[in-house]
Structures are given as C-alpha cells and as structure tokens.
C-alpha cells in the first residue's frame, strides 16, 4: 500500500529555535498533503492543507507565520515551526491523499508515523 | 469543522466483541472512516464505508452506518490484546478535509 514517511520522528529543541519536519510520499505523487497536530489524549486537529506549487490553506486559529508549510514537489511537504516555544510541543502528523487508481476514488488518506516535538 | 463524537474509553476481555460508537453532524459526508493509532505511532486506516451503505464487513471488523441518526459503529470480533489502541472515526467533508472524533481508547484485558 501507499506509504507516507515523516522525519524526524522525535525532535527536542530549545525555545526560540526553528524546527523543520518533512513529510514524504514514498510511492505515489501527492498533490495535496495535510498537517495535523495532536495534543495528549485528544483528537487530531487539522492545521493546514498543503498544495503542491501553491500556498498552503490554514485552518482558522492557526498562525501561518508560526507554522510555515512548503510543498515544493509532488512527494515532499515540510512544516517549519518557527521560534518554537514550549506550548508548541506536540505530536505532528502529516497525511497525503493518493490521486492514483484505487486511491483517489475513496479519498483515502495515508498517514505518516508522526513527529513528536518537545520544546525546552 | 464538523462535530464528530466518540466515547473516550472501552474495556473488554480478550475473545469478546468490542463495539466502538461514533456520531457525526455533517449529513453530506460521503465517506466515513475508522483509523487505529498505536502508542507513539501515526494513524492506520482500518476500514471505510461509503455513505450509501448500511454495513461493511472485513474479516473481524464490521462497520454499521445509520445515516438517519448519523451514527457509525465499529465492531471487532474476537478482540485480541493486540487490538488495544486508540480508534478514531473520521468523516470526509468534500474531497479534501477529514474531521476526526476524539478517539476511543480500547483496552483489552487478557
């Protein structure tokens, strides 16, 4: 099946630094990728929709200058948490919607393994 | 986003059936999904159902959809300890956005 890979899986950084998380679709092209944030014991919150070759669409309440998203190719989207603070510590998960036969019809989403960010 | 609600916890004994329930509000949802999340991991798609279906069976998994009541359930037959995880239901809005429930933590006791 389709595979989405995230890197790094865990990152610890100091307050005020920026952290980049990569999301790659390994065996299919993803024109659209999604970034979610998950707080402990809570559901996933959609942060933004990443569109290849154009600007990301952010959900209400998500700071676009804080969470920079770049979708430069059909297989890679990056999320950069700028000037990270302890309250940004969370589990970030990306997903990609396959557009190929057997994938696009259901709108099936494939998820990465997640990246746990800890800001000290 | 849309409201998708689930109970937070479910505890069953190994070998019993588990039923996880979900309610949603968007009557225009076309697909509804069940995802499984193991500790520290991402989400794994278990199964999905198209909105014009009432039931879908896939090995030990049975999905029931009551569109009138906007109620979705996931039944796991012969539940095993390896089934312990958090289960999320999700609905698709349009063709691009998924909205997830809060997740039900399933604990399977040996």
Image (cartoon, rainbow, N blue to C red):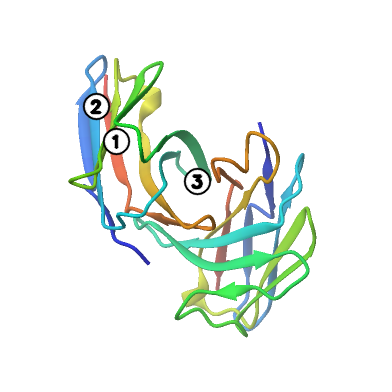
For marks 2 and 3 on the same chain, the one whose residue lies earlier in the sequence:
2
For residue B91, side relative to residue A10 (left or right)? left
Subunit that carries the residue with mark 1: B
Tag 2 secondary structure = strand
Q: Position of residue A72 (x, y in %)?
A: 80, 66
**Whether marks 2 and 1 lie on the same chain:** yes
User: How many residues crowd mark 1 within 10 Å: few (<14), some (14–19), many (20+)?
Assistant: many
For residue A17, side relative to residue B83 (left or right)? right
Q: Position of residue A114 (x, y in %)?
A: 58, 52
Subunit that carries the residue with mark 3: B
For marks 1 and 3 on the same chain, the one whose residue lies earlier in the sequence:
3
Residue behind mark 2: B18
Which label belongs to residue B40? 3
* Image point (54%, 58%), residue name: B96
User: How many residues crowd mark 2 within 10 Å: few (<14), some (14–19), many (20+)?
Assistant: many
Say if A106 sits above or below B110 in the image: below
| Proximity of marks 2 and 3: CB atoms separated by less than 8 Å | no
Which label belongs to residue A79? none
Say if A119 sits above or below A35 in the image: below
| Proximity of marks 2 and 1: CB atoms separated by less than 8 Å | yes
User: How many residues crowd mark 3 within 10 Å: few (<14), some (14–19), many (20+)?
Assistant: few
* Image point (77%, 39%), residue name: A27
Front-most of residues A106 and B105: A106
Residue behind mark 1: B106
**Marks 1 and 3: which is nearer the front?**
1
* Image point (29%, 61%), residue name: B3
CA distance separating discs 2 and 3: 23 Å
Say if A90 sits above or below A93 in the image: below
**Marks 2 and 3: which is nearer the front?**
2
């Amino acid at each position: 099946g389709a595979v989405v890979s995230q890197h790094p899986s865990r990152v610890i950084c100091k307050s005020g630094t920026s952290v980049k998380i990569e999301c790659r679709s390994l065996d299919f092209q993803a024109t659209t990728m999604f970034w979610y944030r998950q707080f402990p014991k809570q559901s996933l919150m959609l942060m933004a929709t990443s569109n290849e070759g154009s600007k990301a669409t952010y959900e209400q309440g998500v700071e676009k200058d804080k969470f920079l998203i770049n979708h430069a190719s059909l297989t890679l989207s990056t999320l950069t948490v700028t000037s990270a603070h302890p309250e940004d510590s969370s589990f970030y998960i990306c997903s990609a919607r396959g557009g190929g036969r057997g994938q696009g019809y259901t709108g099936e989403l494939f998820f990465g393994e997640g990246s746990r960010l800890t800001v000290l | 986003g849309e409201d998708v609600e689930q109970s937070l916890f479910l505890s069953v004994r190994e070998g019993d059936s588990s039923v996880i329930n979900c309610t949603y509000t968007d009557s225009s949802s076309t697909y509804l999904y069940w995802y499984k999340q193991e500790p520290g991991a991402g989400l794994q798609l278990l199964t999905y159902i198209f909105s014009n279906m009432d039931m879908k069976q896939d090995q030990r998994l049975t999905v029931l959809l009551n569109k009138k009541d906007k109620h979705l359930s996931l039944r796991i037959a012969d539940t095993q300890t390896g089934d312990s995880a958090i289960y999320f239901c999700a609905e698709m809005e349009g063709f691009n956005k998924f909205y997830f429930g809060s997740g039900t933590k399933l604990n399977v006791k040996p």
